[in-house]
Image (cartoon, helix red, strand yellow):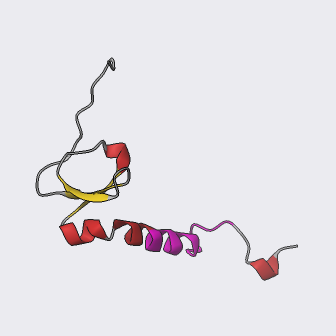
Amino acid sequence: MPLFHHQPTGKPGEWFFCLKHQTVEEGPQCAAKDRLGPYQTREEAAHALETAAERNREWRNDPAWNDERPEDDRS
C-alpha cells in the first residue's frame, strides 16, 4: 500500500488524452503525469498527439529556441 495516495487533478468538463491508456477522458481519471491537456473539447483531446507533434516541429524550427547551426554551416 502506498504511503501517499494522490488524487488525479482536473475538473469535469475538462478533456484530457491519457498516454497510459491511449484514450480521451473527461475530468480527473488518470494521474496528471500520464495525461496531456486540459483541452476544451473531446475532439481537441482526441488530437492531442498530433497537436504535440506539431508544436514540437515548430519548436525545433524556431530560431529563437534553436542553438544549433544549420547543416550546411557546420564545420
- The location of residue 73, given as percent across then percent down, is 80, 79
Quadrant of the drawing holding the C terminus: bottom right
Residue appearing at x 19%, y 67% in the figure: 42
Q: Is 26 located above or below residue 51 in the figure?
A: above
Q: Is residue 70 left or right of residue 21?
A: right
Q: Is 66 located above or below residue 6 in the figure?
A: below
Look at the image and say whether residue 60 sits in the magenta stretch.
yes
- The location of residue 41, given as percent across then percent down, is 18, 68
Residue at the extreme right: 75
Q: Can residue 69 be seen in the rendering of this structure?
A: yes
Residue appearing at x 40%, y 72% in the figure: 50
Look at the image and say whether residue 40 sits in the magenta stretch.
no
Q: How many labels does the image show?
A: 0
- The location of residue 13, given as percent across then percent down, is 11, 57
Q: Can residue 37 be seen in the rendering of this structure?
A: no
Q: Is 10 located above or below residue 25 in the figure?
A: above
Q: In which quarter of the image is residue 62?
A: bottom right
Give the residues drawn in magenta, as a range: 53-67
Q: Quadrant of residue 1?
A: top left
Q: Is 38 located above or below residue 72 in the figure?
A: above
